[in-house]
Image: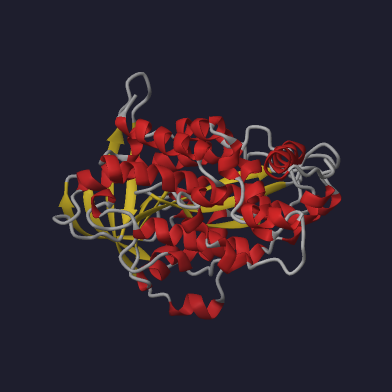
Amino acid sequence: MPSGYRLLQNQITRLRTKTVDEILTLWGPWTHLTEILGTPKRMRLFPPSQTFWLFLSQVLEADHSCRTVVRKFLLWLTLKTGKNASPNTASFCKARARLPQKGLELIHRRLTNEIEAQTADDLLWRQRRVKIVDGTGLSMPDTRANQKIYPQSKRQKPGCGFPVMKLVAAFSLATGTIIGFVKGTLHDAERILFKNLWGLFEPGDVVLADSAFCSYADFYFLSQRRVDCVMANHHRRTKGLEFVKSLGKEDRLLYWIKMRPCPTWLEKRQWEKVPEKLLIREVSFSVTVRGFKTKRITLATTLLDQRQYPKEDLAQLYRRRWIAELYLRDIKITMGMDILRCKTPDMVHKELIMYIIAYNLIRALLLQSCIIMQVQMDRLSFKGALAILRQANSSMLLLTQLPHSADRF
C-alpha cells in the first residue's frame, strides 16, 4: 500500500476513537458551519449544523436513503444520551428542506477557496492554475415539479422518460476539486452555460476544454479578463481564417475573422464591441494509442509565445484534459450522483450542492495526505479514499453540534 494511502487510512481510523468535537479538527475548519448556518433559535432534534452533517453522511454512503441516515442517528442518540426518537424520516426531510441554498453555496465557495489556497506551487502548470471545463447530464425522479423545470428529451413520449439536468463544471487540474458549476436543462447548450462560469476565472488562469467550448466570443471575453485558453479547435471552423506566420512544424499564428451573425447568447451591443480580428495560435499533433486508430487534434490557444509555451507542453497539457472525465466519473458513478433522488427542484439543487461539497471534502483529504507525504495527487485513488470513509465508524460523519444539542433532549 502506498505511503499516501497509509496516511489517509490512519487519519480516518483515528477518528473512530474521537468525540464529535475532535472530529472537527479534520473537516470542521473547512466548512464554517456555525458562522454560515447559525445557531438554532428553537430546540429541534435536527438543528442546521446537525442536519448538514447527516445530509453529508447520506450522500457519502452507498445507500443514499433517508431511512438509513435516520437509523444511524437514532443509534447514536440511544448510545450517547439513552433517549429515543421516532424512526419516521419526515422530521429529517423537513430539516433538509430548511437548509438555506445560499448558505450551502457559500460553504462550497469557502471550501474551494481554502483548498486552492493550500495548493502548492509544484502542483501548478508552469506556475499557472489550470481549470478544466466539461459538461455532463444528471437524471432525477419523474415528478411533475421536476419535469416542469428540467423537461425530458422531446424525442421521448410523455411518461416514458425522466427529467434531465445539464451540468457544466469547472475543475482544478491541480487538486481535482469542483471550483464552480452551472445548471441548465437538457435543451441548453453547454457553451451558453459556460458563459455563467466566466466569473470564476482569475487573471493568470488557463482554461482547458474540448471543442464544444471553443468560440470566438469566449476567447475574446476571457482574454479581456487576462485568462488564457487552451481548447480543441472546432472541426467546423474552416472559414474566417487569415494566416500570419509559422512558429514551427504544425505550429502557426492565425487571425480569426469575426463573422457577421451575432451569437444568440450575446447582446448585439456586446457583439459590436468585439474586434474584427483575433490573434490565435494553432497547434496540431497526433495521439497514438496502441490498438486504436491514431487521432489528429488541433488546438486553439491564446498562449502565443512558442518559447515560453512549446508545442509539446501544450500537447501534454491537453492530454490531461481527459482527467475531467475521470473526475466526473468519481462523483457520478463512484459516489452515485448520476441519479439524483429528491422529488422537487429545490431539494434536487440542495442534493447536488451537498454531493459537490462531499466530493471536495474528500479531495481536501487527499490533498492533505499528498502534502504531508510529498506524493502526487494521481498516486491516490478517489474510490479508495471513499471506500475507507465508508468503512470508518459512522460517528465521524456526525455533526458539529451533537455534543451540545444532546443535552436539550
In-front residue for pair 388/156: 388
Image height of 9 relative to 305, above or below = above
Residue positioned most to the top: 291
- Residue 138 visible (yes or no): yes
Q: Number of labelled discs? A: 0
Q: Residue at x 84, y 48 (%)?
A: 90
Name the quadrant containing residue 140: top right
Residue at (42%, 39%) from the top-left corner? 11
| Residue 37 image point, x, y percent | 63, 65
Q: Is residue 250 visible?
A: no
| Quarter of the figure that contains the N terminus | top left
Q: Where is residue 153 drawn, in percent x and y?
A: 73, 44
Indicate how the structure is coloured in the image.
Answer: secondary structure
Q: Which residue is nearer to you in this view: 342 or 393?
A: 393
Q: x, y percentage for residue 233?
A: 38, 50
Q: Position of residue 381 (x, y in %)?
A: 41, 33
Left or right: 240 as drawn, with respect to 302: right
User: In the rendered image of this protein, does residue 169 appear above or below residue 275?
Assistant: above
Residue at the image position 40 percent from the left and 55 percent from the top:
115
Q: Nearer the viewer, residue 222 or 97?
A: 97
- Indicate the quadrant containing the C terminus: top left, top right, bottom left or bottom right: bottom right
Question: For this view, does 262 lie left or right of residue 161?
Answer: left
The residue positioned 55% from the left and 42% from the top of the image is 396
